[in-house]
C-alpha cells in the first residue's frame, strides 16, 4: 500500500510518517497542494493525507482536483482547523475522511478502515 503525505510542514510530515509507516509499504511526500496532483499521478497512492492550509494551492483545491480526475481516490484531510465549516469544505472537495492534527493517532484507524488494512 502506498501513502501520499501532503503538508507544507516537514516536521508534521515526519510525525505522520512515524505514526503510520508500519501500516504501509511505501510513503511519498510533497509540501504543497500544487505538487499533490502530479505526485498522485506518479505514485498512484492508495491513500492521501492532505493538509488544508498551504501556500500556493490549498488542500481543498488539491483534493478536488485529485478526486475529480480519479473518483476512487481516497483522501483524508489532516488539519488544525476542525470546525464544522472546514469539515463541510473537506467533504465537498471529495475527501472521504477528516482528522484533526490534535488527534493524529486516529490516522491509524482511519487508514485501517478506509483501506481494509490489518494492523501489523
Image (tube, rainbow, N blue to C red):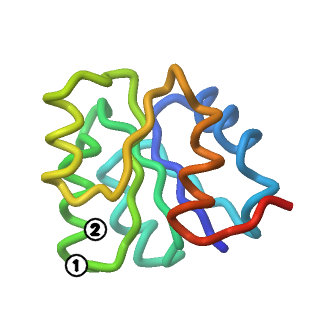
Residue at x 52%, y 72% (from the top left corner): 45
Q: Nearer the viewer, residue 50 or 113?
A: 113
- Which SS class for mark 1? helix
Which mark is on residue 22?
none
Residue bearing the label numbered 1: 69
Residue at x 73%, y 64% (from the top left corner): 24
Question: Quick check: 84 left or right of 48?
Answer: left
Where is residue 66 shown, x and y percent of the image?
Answer: 28, 68
Q: Against 50, is 79 above or below?
A: above
Split into 4 quadrants, where in the image is the C terminus? bottom right
Which mark is on residue 66?
2
Residue at x 49%, y 78% (from the top left corner): 44
> Residue extending furthest right?
120
Question: Quick check: 46 left or right of 14?
Answer: left
Split into 4 quadrants, where in the image is the N terminus? bottom right
Q: Nearer the viewer, residue 47 or 66?
A: 47
Disc 1 versus disc 2: distance between alpha carbons? Answer: 5 Å
Disc 2: CA contacts within 10 A as few (<14), some (14-19) or many (>=20): many
- Whether the residues at callouts 1 and 2 have beta carbons within 8 Å, the answer is yes
In which image quadrant can residue 25 be found? bottom right
Question: Quick check: 102 left or right of 13?
Answer: left
Disc 1: CA contacts within 10 A as few (<14), some (14-19) or many (>=20): few
Q: Against 120, is 31 above or below?
A: above
Where is residue 17 shown, x and y percent of the image?
Answer: 70, 44
Amino acid at each position: 500500500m502506498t501513502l501520499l503525505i501532503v503538508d507544507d510542514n516537514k516536521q508534521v510530515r515526519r510525525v505522520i510518517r512515524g505514526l503510520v509507516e508500519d501500516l504501509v509499504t511505501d510513503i511519498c511526500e510533497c509540501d504543497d497542494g500544487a505538487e499533490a496532483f502530479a505526485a498522485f499521478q506518479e505514485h498512484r497512492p492508495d491513500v492521501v493525507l492532505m493538509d488544508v492550509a498551504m501556500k500556493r494551492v490549498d488542500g481543498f483545491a488539491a483534493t478536488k482536483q485529485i478526486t475529480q480526475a480519479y473518483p476512487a481516490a481516497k483522501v483524508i484531510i489532516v488539519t488544525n482547523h476542525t470546525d464544522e465549516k472546514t469539515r463541510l469544505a473537506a467533504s465537498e472537495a471529495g475527501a472521504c475522511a477528516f482528522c484533526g492534527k490534535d488527534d493524529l493517532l486516529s490516522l491509524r484507524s482511519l487508514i485501517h478502515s478506509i483501506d481494509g488494512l490489518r494492523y501489523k
